[in-house]
Every structure is written in structure tokens, then in C-alpha cells.
Image: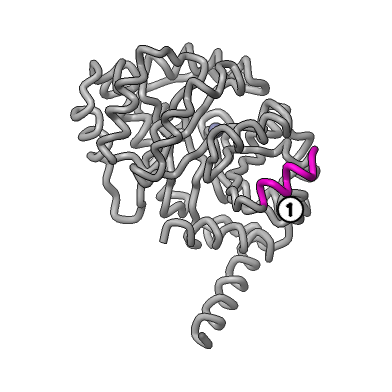
Amino acid sequence: MVIETISNYIDLMTFEKALKDNDKKLLVSIPKIDIHNHAVSSCTKSYLKKQGIKLSEEKIDNISSLIEFSRTYLTPLQLDYNGLKILLKGNFENCIKTGVNIVSTEIDYKNCIRTFNSDVNKFINFLKSFKYKNLKILWDLGISRDSYKEEYKSIILELLNTKFFSGIDLTSTENSVPNSKFIDFYKLDNDLGIITKVHAGEQLGADYIKKCINDFKPKMIQHGIHIVENESIMKLAKSKGIIFNVCPTSNVTLGYAPSIKKHPIKKMVEYGLNVTIGTDDLLFFDSDINDEYIKLYKEGTLSIEQLKVIKDFGLNLFK
Ligand SMILES: [Zn+2]
């Protein structure tokens, strides 16, 4: 107990020094987790450039420019086995470089259909081939609402039933498809022992978060920042112990939060919601996990103690 207290104190001092001195090197040396990471859009542009892949330098500052960028550059890259490999390798090498030692990352089931001709074993063996000594990779099966078709249900179930995936994550445009289409996947959580995540409350308001809580009973909500608009829904989420994986730079860049300083994460933490900090899509937002912590500290959004609680809470989830 005494040893634990001393080691916790030393950790806090190191974390404080790193943030106060804006010492990114020291911050990198501190273990961190990223639970909100999209596998194919989380490497850096400079990494891709080194691989001979040039992308547009156009600024992404809203959801339509992000979708346009993805369609033009990322989708064609992912169709090719080597292109997909480069995107994933770039993500994981960047995790290691930035001191992320556990990443819970989302890959869409369509990658299995498009790149591996629906061969579930080949797809999973490909994912398994990403092994690193200093990085634990937890794969979530992503289900994009926008492109979902009923005919894909069987392959999603086949993928989930392999029990390779640690979780599922419902992504893209909130409420573009009725929740009822996806409820069956979420009902499997106990059988499969998976972590259920859903993107909600980034684009839409607190009512949609409530709807997703009731429909999916998720363990985690990706973003969920608009929950601060409604205290009774915050109370509901708190009572259920739901974890919010928040990505401040992503929210500000896409116009869903006014600034880092005024980011809803402050209110979420003060209310006592379970929060972790993630990067979302590093390729679009150019802000790694250390940048996120530094920005939240520098802008006075959260204190060092609050940021340390967030960091440790995330790490302890997967110990
Ligand atoms: Zn996301």
C-alpha cells in the first residue's frame, strides 16, 4: 500500500513536470491508452509520404471535407492489401512512438469484404499479423451506419463469432440508419465478451445519446460530448457507469465543440462521468495523444490531477 502510494506520487510528479514544461519527450515515456482510434485513419501524413503515398494538403475543417478526403484517398488505398497494411502499420508505429501502449482500434467489416473478398480467416490472420512488443492492440469491429446493408449482417455475425474482436463500434453519421438495424449485434455482448461502443452525441444532441443508451446498452460512448446539454441524461449515464472516449481536437476541428478551453469534457469530468482521452483520426487532425493532454492542460480545461485520473482510469480498464 505504501509502495503503491509512493509510486503513484512519483507518477503524478513526472506527469506534472511533463505537462508544465511542455516536455513531450517525457510525456512520451509515460504509458497511455487510446480507446478512440480508427485503424485506417490514424497514421501521419509524413509516414505515408515516406511510403511514397502523397495526400492532399487541403485542410479538413468539417465533416463533409473529412468524408470527401476519405473517399478520395483512403478508400482506394484500403482496397489494396499493401495499402491497407501501410495505413495500419503507420498507425501502430505512431502509437509506439507517442507512448501509447494499449490501443483499442476500430476496423470496418467492409475491409474484409473489399480487400479480402469476404474471406474471414484471411482477414483475421492479416489483423493478427500486427504484433508489437510494446503495444497491445485490441481490435473493434466497426460498423459504419452510412453504408450498412442488411445483406452484410451474416458476415458481421461471422466475424464477431470468431471471438477475435474485443469489441464493436457503430460509426459514421449518427441516426442515418435506425438503431433497430444494429441492436442484434449489441445483444451478443455477453456471449462474446465484447466491449460495446457506439458513436453518439458528437453530431447529435443528448436525446440521441439517451436513445443509444436505451437501445444498445453500450459500455462506451465515442465522443458523447453533447450530453452536457442535459443533466438528467448525464445522471443516467453516470448511474450506468458508461465510459466516454472523448477526442477534443477532433471535436474542435469539425466544429462540434467551440474550443479546447470551452470543451464539454470539463463539465463531463466535473459531473463525475467516466472519461478517457483519444485521438479519433490522427491523419485528419494531426494531434497525437500527448498533444491532447498538453492542450487540455495548457488551456486550463482540466487540471493535472484530473488528467492523471483520466490517464490511469483508461489504463486500468485493460490491465
Ligand atoms: Zn470516432
Does the stretch in magenta take in 237?
A: yes
Side of 57 where 55 appears, left or right: left
Can residue 272 be seen from the camera position used here? yes
Residue 269, compared with residue 263, is above or below; it is below
Q: Residues within 10 Å of mark 1 (few under 14, many from 20)?
A: some
Which region of the structure is painted magenta?
229-238
Residue at 45% across / 52% down in the picture? Answer: 100
Q: Residue furthest bottom?
A: 2
Above or below 193: residue 79: above
Is 129 left, or right, of 235 in this rendering? left
- Residue 2, image x and y in percent? 53, 88
Q: Residue at x 62, y 43 (%)?
A: 246
Q: Amino acid at mark 1?
A: Lys
Judge by depth and name the residue closer to the eye, 16 or 104. 104
Whole-percent x and y of residue 69? 53, 16
* Quadrant of the rendered image containing residue 9: bottom right
Main SS, magenta residues: helix
For the point 41% across and 41% down, which residue is it? 189
Q: Nearer the viewer, residue 91 or 305?
A: 305
Determine which quarter of the picture holds residue 202. top right
Q: Nearer the viewer, residue 207 or 274?
A: 207
Q: Which residue is mark 1?
A: 298
Residue 221: in magenta span:
no
Residue 95: % across, % down: 43, 46
The answer, for residue 43, to whether it is visible in the render is no
Apparent side of residue 285 relative to residue 117 in the rendered image (left or right): right
Query: Residue at 65% of width from left, 59% of height from top?
Result: 307
Compared with residue 202, is residue 19 higher up or lower down, i.e. above or below? below
